[in-house]
Amino acid sequence: MSTTKYAELGAFLRSRRERIRPEDVGLVAGPRRRVAGLRRDEVALLAGASVDYYSELERGAGSQPSEQMLAALARALRLTADEHDHLFHLAGRPVPVSGGPAAHVHPGMTDLLTRMTSTPAQVITDLHVTLAQNALAVALLGDHSRFQGPDASFVRRWFTDPRARALYPEEEHATQSRAFVADVRAAVARRPARDAEARSLVADLRARSPEFAELWEQHDVAVRRADRKRLVHPVLGLLDVNCLHLFSEDGRQRLLWFTPAVGTDTADKLELLAVVGTQELVGERD
């Protein structure tokens, strides 16, 4: 990346940082604050970067940021779709496809996710690619940011990697498979006929998973809007939860959040999530 582009990238990041108030992103301003917007260390915290690394970006120095880091910065700075794409152009990276893990997340969904501090929540696409998670969702489901390319879709992992099924009790795997396929069929129909991401996902799964191929031929369709689920956590055991969905206007993204089912001991277990954290999570979670 050229020196000029580095300087423009730094100036753009600084301008976006200075326009955001701490309370806009769930931070406490404090009585002795000397800047109107966010501090560099606060942006670094929100994006999961080191303060030194982010400071170098604003100075127009350092290495070219990855797509994952750019996506994290876009979410931290509440960038619009146009600003998100501009950030990638300045960094010399191709603008991510709409459904990929580095895709733009609507600032409104990011704001809601930030404010959900007492319940697991995450933003996913209609093809079940995780775009953002809060800390409790990572503790409950695992860190999905490590999955890239085709494996970023949990539906693909569900039908191609047995580890993905550890989240649900074995006796419920068939039910979940049917629900995933019906939901994906609805998503594919909403997208343009030549949508490369959707066509590739379906073609790959029909070729690799006899189970998916058989279910796909049944033509069942049902958008997942709310589910009562049983999840298997490696430390807390079986959890009975309600999984609720909030959709974007175009239906391409949804905010999921998990609440304890009434009449179960799951509320007490979910309170332990913040204590358990991610220290003992192993294997695939979703």
Image: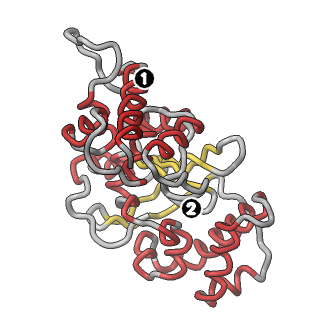
Point 33% across, 37% down: residue = 46
Disc 2 crowd, CA 10 A, few/some/many (<14, 14-19, 20+) = many
Q: Amino acid at mark 1?
A: Asp
Residue 270's place in the image compared with 51, above or below, is: below
60, 42: nearer the viewer:
60
The residue under the point 56% across, 70% down is: 155
* Residue at mark 2: 128
Q: Is residue 140 visible?
A: yes
Answer with the quarter of the image where residue 34 lies: top left
Q: Say what secondary structure mark 1 lies in.
A: helix
Image location (x, y in percent) of residue 96: 54, 54
Amino acid on which disc 2 is placed: His
Residue 248: horizontal and vertical position, in percent?
65, 42
Q: Nearer the viewer, residue 260 or 174?
A: 174
Which residue is pictured at 25% across the width and 45% down the height? Answer: 62
Q: Is residue 45 visible?
A: no
Q: Which residue is disc 1 drawn over?
A: 24
In depth, the one of 166 and 199 nearer the eye is 199
Q: Which mark is residue 192?
A: none
- The location of residue 176, given as percent across then percent down, is 58, 71
| Of the pair 98 and 167, the residue shown nearer to us | 98
Instruction: Classify mark 1: residues with Cα within 10 Å, few (<14), some (14-19) or many (20+).
Output: some
Q: Earlier in the sequence, mark 2 or mark 1?
A: 1
Element under label 2?
A: loop
Left or right of residue 230: residue 125: right
Q: Quadrant of the C terminus?
A: bottom left
Instruction: Please state if 44 lies on the left or on the right of 116 as rendered.
Output: left
